[in-house]
Image: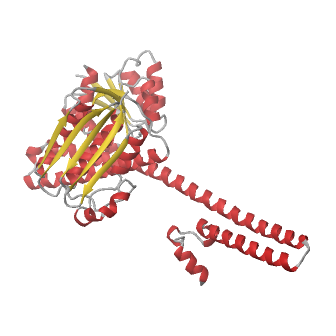
Amino acid sequence: MKTILFIEDEPTIQKSISRFLEEEGYQVKSALDGDIGLKTAKKIQPDLILLDLILPKKDGFEVLKELKKEEATKNIPVIALTNLEESANIEKVLSLGAAAYLIKANYSLEEITEKIKQILE
Amino acid sequence: MLIGKISKSLKCKKYNLTLWQCPSFLFLLTGLIIIITMISSYLIAVRYTQPEIVALIVIGITVVLLIINHFIIQSVEKLAEANKMKTEFIGIVSHQLRTPLTGIKWTINLIMREKGKLDEHCLQELKEISENNERMIKLVNDLLDVTKIEQGQLSFKPEKVSIEALFKNIIKEYTPIAKAKNIEINLETEINSLSVLIDKQRIEIVIRNLIDNAIKYIKNKGEIKIHLTKKNKSIRCEIKDNGVGIPKDDHKNIFQKFFRSKNIMKNETVGTGLGLFIAKSIIKESKGRIGFHSKENKGSTFWFKIPIN
């Protein structure tokens, strides 16, 4: 069973994705802020990370930077999942090594799962 | 009282400006002062021969004019600042709005998955909530696009795309909604699989907005004809509907932000008045052209042309 780490501070969003992905057969671990997210990633080495960008303690950009620096986590694909849109953010995140940039409000849970499947293949 | 009347006729009240912040009033005042100065300096020059007096008056008046100009500049700066703040405000609010909207969207998503457990009635109502939520998301996205246009942030990222495939995908997406209203969407193409270098994401927004409008403004039953042609070094896309059309009086305003035509306000209240404004801004940035012809009750044809090289 593939493990997905979801770093997100909004409980409703956190809950709905986790439930959906669990029903789809993934194991989902959650982290509510950047710091915990980073620590959890190092500890459990998930197959994929879903990362919000506006996070308490350490924002998504910082988390992504550190994930890609660490030997243990640098090969884990990261999907930035956010409602921030400025194209500057998109470019920044992709240049930091994220596999995709998805705007939450524009995707259904099915479409996000589809994207995860594609990237995990 | 006179000042009150002037202020009313200058519409300064509409913008919540006092008379001393209202550029049009200040301009009027400047003009009046200049005219009075010219006449009075002429009269004084005729009566008194000392040029010093005339010079003094002119200097005095110039100082007054400078002060008025200072007011004008201040008020314009204030307006520009307010405009900037408004744009930033919309940007921030839109981001904040998207989070709860996503929460609603995904929660409905989860509930709808267990369709078997819901009765027909419930399902129908959930669908309505979902549709309304999608409409809010579209509005927020539109507002964000407008903010980007106004801040000059619309960055263009060209990629190689087959225009025909692009249209086919979007048509496929809209077919269920069109079918529900008994509308047929037909695509005629003279460009086949021609691939061109365009900003796919942005052009997609334009096409979506035009098709969306065509469907929205066909009352019930109708046809949307899409025609793609290539001429010299540009591609022309035409989207023709037999919907309610646009009254002649509204033609000149149709691409303006938040503008909505009178005849659609009567029947159809859904819409933001932003779609065509966004479409025009995108096409303009792509160095293309956009236009339309339309007759009330007969239908509208919108077209855009974008260079390909």
Name of the residue lying farthest toward the front? B46
Q: Quadrant of the N terminus of chain A?
A: top left
User: Left or right of B222: which side holds B45?
Assistant: right
Horizontal and vertical percent for residue A56? 46, 39
User: Total label count?
Assistant: 0
Q: Residue B82 occupies which quadrant of the picture?
A: bottom right
The residue at the point 27 percent across, 21 percent down is A120
Residue B130 seen by the camera = no
Name of the residue lying farthest toward the top? A71
Q: Quadrant of the C terminus of chain A?
A: top left
| Foreground of the two, A39 or B30 | B30
Position above or below: B224 against A120:
below
Horizontal and vertical percent for residue A16? 26, 41
The residue at the point 44 percent across, 15 percent down is A71
Query: How is the structure coloured here?
Result: secondary structure
| Foreground of the two, B43 or B92 | B43
| Foreground of the two, B260 or A6 | B260
Horizontal and vertical percent for residue A28? 28, 30
Horizontal and vertical percent for residue B230? 28, 32
User: Left or right of B274: which side holds B13?
Assistant: right
Q: Residue B266 occupies which quadrant of the picture?
A: bottom left
Position above or below: A75 against A17:
above
Residue B133 seen by the camera = yes
The residue at the point 39 percent across, 55 percent down is B256
| Foreground of the two, A70 or B258 | B258
